[in-house]
Amino acid sequence: MSGNDTKLTDLVGSQVTVITNDGKHYVGVLRGYDQTWNLLLQECQERVYSTKSGVQVIANPGIYCIRGDNVAIVGEVDEEADGAVDLSAVRAAPLVPIRH
């Protein structure tokens, strides 16, 4: 097991944020992953950014799978800080897909 796998293992059961290569942002509880970094998120929400309106939150109840070849970044969420943010007041440019 590599150092990266160990760090991802430490996040199982924690709320994480995932940014994908196609420019999407997900937040949910990491329930599992495999050797190709396919991720399983529970109580997942997609956050869609806009410069004109607040962040649109799309709920994905149940278990949501994100393909490992589409994962750009995974990080732990500070739930207290995240809960204090009024997403309806946040204005930001939409995330753009990563070009290889």
Image (spheres, rainbow, N blue to C red):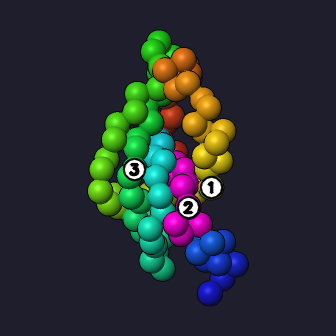
**The residue under label 3 is which amino acid type?**
Cys
Q: Position of residue 58 (x, y in %)?
A: 34, 37
**The residue under label 2 is which amino acid type?**
Ser
Write the residue at 60% across / 29% down.
85
Which of the numbered marks, if any, corresponds to residue 95?
none
**The residue under label 1 is which amino acid type?**
Glu
Q: Which residue is denoted by mark 3 in the rendering?
A: 44
Write the residue at 55% across / 24% down.
86
Asked which secondary structure carries label 3, the reply is: strand
Write the residue at 33% across / 57% down.
64
* Mark 3 or 2, nearer chain start: 2
* Camera-side residue of 94 and 30: 30
Asked which secondary structure carries label 1, the reply is: strand
* Camera-side residue of 14 and 40: 14
Do callouts 1 and 2 mark residues in contact (Cβ within 8 Å)? yes
Q: Badge 2: few (under 14), some or many (20 or more) residues near its Cα, within 10 Å? A: some
Asked which secondary structure carries label 2, the reply is: loop
Does the magenta run of residues contain 69? Answer: no
Does the magenta run of residues contain 16? Answer: yes
Range drawn in magenta: 11-19
State the separation of the CA atoms marked 1 and 2. 7 Å
Asked whether residue 68 is in view, the answer is no
Do callouts 3 and 2 mark residues in contact (Cβ within 8 Å)? no
Which of the numbered marks, if any, corresponds to residue 14?
2
* Mark 1 or 2, nearer chain start: 2
Q: Which residue is denoted by mark 1 in the rendering?
A: 76
* Mark 3 or 1, nearer chain start: 3
